[in-house]
Amino acid sequence: MTGATLPRHLHAVPSQSAESTNGQLILTAGEKDSRLAALALRHHAQLLSIPHRLLGARLNHAVLYTRAEWLIFPFQGAAVPSAWQPIFSQLDTHLLDAAMIGIPQPTLTERLLQRFLPPTTPVPPYLAVTRTWLEKIGGFDAELDLAAPSDLLQRLMACPTRIKALDVDLHRRRKTNVHRLDDENNDINPTPPPPTQLPS
């Protein structure tokens, strides 16, 4: 993930100092960038500057710097902080090899068509893959740049991968109580009482 959405995305990722996660946050860059270095420091992330490498090669390089079993790659959008706990609770290596986070589950017909037709599955906001399975299919294609995520997803879909779409709400925020000014219990312009009838 690059561009203006990166700071918002980093703000949503659980802090490395939080007790609820033992994860590691890694950023990659094609060249040295003081702004990106400042962001990495602020969010307790490790920054890897890998010049003259395409996106696929940079992502493979980042994988080497962590021994985590689940690897989560952000591709678009940014989840709110409250969305992460439901996501983490569903990443079970005994049940899944990969998870497409933020999109509906494809039907069986769509899965089968992936093996015979050109790619049609959209790249999800986040893709989670176990290290074991990522190594099994050879990682990202180091010769691809922006097409590397889509290529990896198509290879996952074409294999007998235990892959599931986690259709979690990435953008829902905690509701707040809003009091209307014309609420019957807090009306600044109450209806005046009817005029008093004087006896004739």
Image (tube, helix red, strand yellow):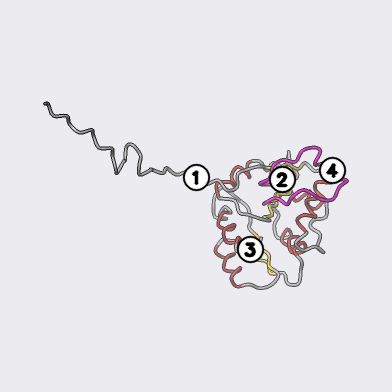
Residue picked out by circle 2: 99
- Residue ranking furthest to the top: 200
Q: Are marks 3 and 1 in contact (CB under 8 Å)?
A: no
Q: Would residue 91 be found to the left or right of residue 162 on screen?
A: left
Mark 3: few/some/many CA within 10 Å (<14, 14-19, 20+): some
Task: Say what amino acid the circle numbered 2 marks.
Answer: Ala
| Lower position in the chain sequence, tag 4 or tag 3 | 3
Which of the 4 image quadrants contains residue 38?
A: bottom right
Residue picked out by circle 1: 174
Report if residue 131 lies within the magenta region: no
Quarter of the image where the N terminus is located: bottom right
- Please identify, in this view, whether the residue under mark 4 or under mark 3 is nearer the observer: 4
Residue picked out by circle 4: 113
Label of residue 58 in the image:
none
Disc 2 to disc 4, C-alpha distance: 19 Å
| Lower position in the chain sequence, tag 3 or tag 2 | 3
Q: Nearer the viewer, residue 48 or 156?
A: 156
Whether residue 69 is situated above or below residue 194 in the rendered picture: below
Task: Say what amino acid the circle numbered 4 marks.
Answer: Leu
Q: Would residue 171 be found to the left or right of residue 177 on screen?
A: right
Residues rendered magenta in the picture: 101-125
Q: Residue at x 66, y 73 (%)?
A: 32
Disc 4 to disc 3, C-alpha distance: 39 Å
